[in-house]
């Protein structure tokens, strides 16, 4: 069958056209009760977008969004059911997925060039150089959660929007630069 008739059995239209940019990531980091300073949030948003682009993973993410989204939603659902450490559980489950995306979609050369920028920044600041890949992975996770939020704001994934909102709070909590635990606690995780 040809034509543009919508398939009623598939209510999830392809939204591979979603473009996640610095403004979108900044909104994710600062909306709600985020405790992140605006300047640091802006820098982190810029870094999250540039990391994904510099690694060359943006097209891969678009092409495989349905599978990536499904896995992140599984991570969130599991984190929501644990009796403690829901933020930790979400991040510890999501980072291997992100590392896999980087491994498959990028190259060693791109990874080295991307992470060198962070190493140079740390050296200028007089900070001992930590592992670079976890930083790149965390920034990529922020990018992915932002993309999921954007995607879930439309009809395509509206049912999962509350899950993406919880993931946003977890990312804000992870990203907070203020004492006192970051963003307001996401709903989820069983009381223990």
Image (cartoon, grey):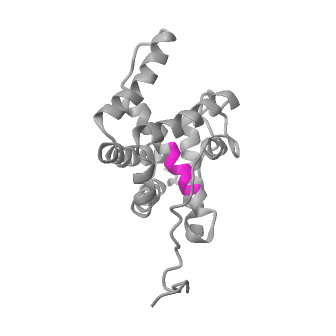
Residue 75 position, x and y percent, is: 42, 55
From which residue to which does the magenta span run? 142-149
Position of residue 1 relative to residue 64, above or below, is below
Which image quarter: residue 119? Answer: top left
Q: Quadrant of the N terminus?
A: bottom left
Residue 115 makes an appearance in the image: yes
Based on the picture, tell me whether residue 72 belongs to the magenta stretch.
no
Residue 167 makes an appearance in the image: no
Viewer-side residue, 12 vs 34? 12
Which image quarter: residue 65? Answer: bottom left
Residue 17 position, x and y percent, is: 54, 60
Please tell me whether the stretch drawn in magenta is mainly helix, strand or loop. Answer: helix
Position of residue 42 relative to residue 100, above or below, is above
Viewer-side residue, 108 vs 134? 108
Q: Is residue 140 left or right of residue 158?
A: left
Based on the picture, tell me whether residue 147 belongs to the magenta stretch.
yes
Residue at left 50%, top 62%? 16
Residue 122 position, x and y percent, is: 47, 16
Residue at left 53%, top 73%? 13
Residue at left 43%, top 44%? 91
Residue farthest toward the front in the current orientation of the protein: 2
Viewer-side residue, 129 vs 50? 50
Residue farthest toward the bottom in the current orientation of the protein: 1
Residue 6 position, x and y percent, is: 55, 84
């Amino acid at each position: 069958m040809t034509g543009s008739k919508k398939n009623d059995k598939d209510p999830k239209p392809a939204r591979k056209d979603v473009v996640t940019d610095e403004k979108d990531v900044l909104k994710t980091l600062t909306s709600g009760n985020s405790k992140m300073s605006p300047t640091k949030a802006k820098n982190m948003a810029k870094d999250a977008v540039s990391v994904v682009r510099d690694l060359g993973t943006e097209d891969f993410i678009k092409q495989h969004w349905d599978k990536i989204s499904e896995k992140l939603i599984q991570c969130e659902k599991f984190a929501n059911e644990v009796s403690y450490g829901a933020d930790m559980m979400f991040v510890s489950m999501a980072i291997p997925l992100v590392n896999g995306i980087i491994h498959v979609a990028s190259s060693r050369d791109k990874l080295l060039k991307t992470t060198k920028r962070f190493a140079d920044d740390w050296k200028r600041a007089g900070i001992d150089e930590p592992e670079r890949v976890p930083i790149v992975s965390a920034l990529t996770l922020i990018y992915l959660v932002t993309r999921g939020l954007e995607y879930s704001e439309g009809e395509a994934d509206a049912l999962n929007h509350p899950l993406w909102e919880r993931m946003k709070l977890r990312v804000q909590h992870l990203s907070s630069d203020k004492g006192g635990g970051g963003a307001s606690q996401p709903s989820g995780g069983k009381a223990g």
